Amino acid sequence: MSFEIFISQFLGGLSVAMLLFLVASGLTLIFGVAKVFNFAHGSFYMLGAYFSYQAIALFDNFWIGAVAAALGAGLVGIALEVCFIRRIAGREEEGAFQILLTYAFILILDDVVKFIWGPAYKTITKPESLAGSLNFGTVTIPTYNLFIIFLGLVIVISAWYVLSRTRMGKIIQAASTDSQMVGVLGVNVSLVMSLVFGVATAMGGLAGAMAAPLRTVAPGTGVEVIIDSLIVVVIGGLGNFWGALFAALLIGEVNAFGILWMPQWASLLSFAVMIVVLIFKPKGLFSQEKGRKKI
Amino acid sequence: MKRKTVSMLSVLLVCFTSTVSFSAETIKIGALYPMSGRGGLYGQDSEAAIKIAVGEVNAKGLPGGKKLEVIVTDDQSKPALAVTLAKRYITEDKVKFLYGVVSSGAALAVTEVSKEYKTIFVGTDHAATDLTANAFQKYYFRVSNNTFQSMAAGAMYMQETKMGGKIAYIGPDYAYGRDQIAELKYSLGKLGVKYEMVGEFWPKLYEPDYTSYITAIIKAKPDVLVSGFWGGDTVAFIKQAKAYGLFNKMKYFHPDGGGNYEVFSTLGAECPEGLIMSARHHNNWPETKENKDFVAKFKKATGRYPSYAAEGAYAGILVIAEAIRKVGNADDTEALIKAMEGMKLHQPEDPAGFTSYIDPKTHQMVQAQAIGVTVKNDKFPPAKYMLGKFKVYPADKIMATQEYIDILIKTKKK
């Protein structure tokens, strides 16, 4: 493989990985802190795309669209947490309820989107400044894909800063270990939960808006991203933010190079990686526990 | 009465409404379409087209003063759900015909119900050749093209325009994607077109990101990229591939569903020029009065131009009405089958001087296929590009041969 092809595949995989990370990190954050398995997380990705579409239609500005997507999805996320998810917290059947409830959100949000914007596919064009391509020798890389990689890095660094350098981040980390104890210490835990939900769903919404110029905006697209995000979260370890980053990069790059070498098996690659990881680290790569104990 | 389910909750609601009795003056047709999710657009367009057709049929009248009534339910393109709904249509709603279905997987399941209950099933959208070949049963009819017809026309186009050389293929990793390239290879072989496959790529259906596939295809350096994408996947692939300059490096050839109107309406000005595509119905071809009228009626009813699915849904109702008129009632199923076999019916998509007919042996509607190239055309907004420079392939030249049906029977059984 020539160096140019390596770079082209690598950067392609990286841009896929960053969008995947934006969705998966929110999913894993919600699980880690609130212990909620948000099956509907992909629907916030879809909502983000539609909010962005609507804002661009009104203001004709891609960046306003991105802000609207993150804000809108975050607010809907907080509303759903406060009105529904919080109500089932702590119940005996909470696990089953979470799946039922969040699965219902998928169906409802899909239909809401269809009622408001219709069933036809929508499109968002790239902002003009990012519409071009850069040529390195024989390799072409779209500027927009480079922008996605850059944006992903900015979010990773910001998340690192917030989680490890701010009081809020420390509370979030503490809440994910023992939320009751954090409550006893005088922290308003339910406010923290809502906030985490809002930030996580806002990231999903932002991912939807950023992906929209590359993909199709249509009802049902949330379900399509949730499976890959789930794989990422499972590989990285449920609730582990950095695990999600590593797993997203792993899946993105394994797919990028796997497609070159074994295109026939491309759609199985993500699952193959997940199976291998689960055999050796049943709780994910970044979990503290060791592999399955032999009885 | 119209039913439309939009979610699991409303499926339950529908269960309650199904006990409402209907007047004896109606002939019921039970239609199954996806009404939600990605496929929802096709279901909604089909329903709108059905309404137009039913309105026309009922205005003209049926024997005994009966009226057609179509019930539409969301099958979510799931085979198991489609089977349940189809059985309920027959046993509880007493429908005389099963109708529609977008997903070939669901259609292959529903055709078994149709056979078991001896109820006619008119397919309007799904394209798997199997239904009129190895999985054929006499109660099944299809009024839209199957993939064999599209790919046979595609092979003829490639021969005519000397498009052989190095070929790569990308298509969704399920029966629809797999069948298309197998059928194209078969037809190219029959025509003696020389080519070399330099890569086959199989993303999953609804894959959101094709970036890694695109760079891999560019590396394979094909002369022609044959594509078997469907619906929104075509849009996503084209948007992503355009930024990589893929369309300047090779010809893009998409003979079954690439030229669907919804692809053009979504891409708008982003659509590249010179893509070679076709569809099961074009809004701007043929330029006959029938097609123009159909498109105008649809636009008037819905405020938008129809996706390809609408025309099949419209035509199927006319076929059923014609059969009922010939037989005089909708109760004699065997007579209806006889009436439909060989039936000639002028459809919006028939070019001047040609009338579609139902092949008595396979119950497949025999239609011409037109393949075109994307050119600037803003007469069907929001599309900015449409197909033009059409080449038309005669209906009898593109039907699945008995030899091919035998191959399917041998390799796939049912």
Image: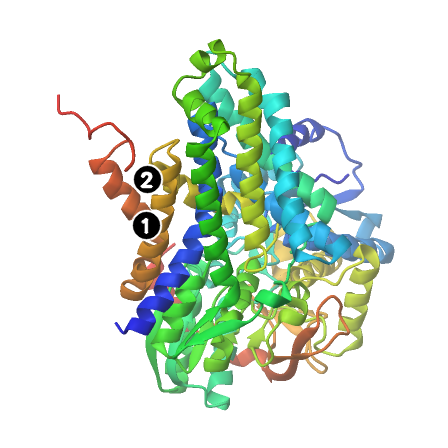
Frontmost residue, B363 versus B129: B129
Q: Position of residue B91 (x, y in %)?
A: 60, 35
- As helix, strand or loop, the secondary structure at mark 1 comes to helix
Q: CA distance from mark 2 to mark 1?
A: 9 Å
Q: Position of residue A96 (x, y in %)?
A: 46, 21
- As helix, strand or loop, the secondary structure at mark 2 comes to helix
Residue B313 appears anywhere in the view: yes
Residue type (three-letter) at the residue carrying disc 1:
Leu
User: Does residue A117 appear to the left or right of B250 in the view shown?
Assistant: right
Quarter in which the N terminus of chain A is drawn: bottom left
Which dot marks residue A235?
A: 2
Instruction: Determine the residue positioned at 73% across, 54% down.
Output: B50
Q: Which residue is mark 1?
A: A250
Frontmost residue, A123 versus B95: A123
Which dot marks residue A205?
A: none
Q: Residues within 10 Å of mark 1 (few under 14, many from 20)?
A: many
Instruction: Determine the residue positioned at 42% across, 39% down.
Output: A160
Chain designation of label 1: A
Q: Quadrant of residue A204?
A: top right
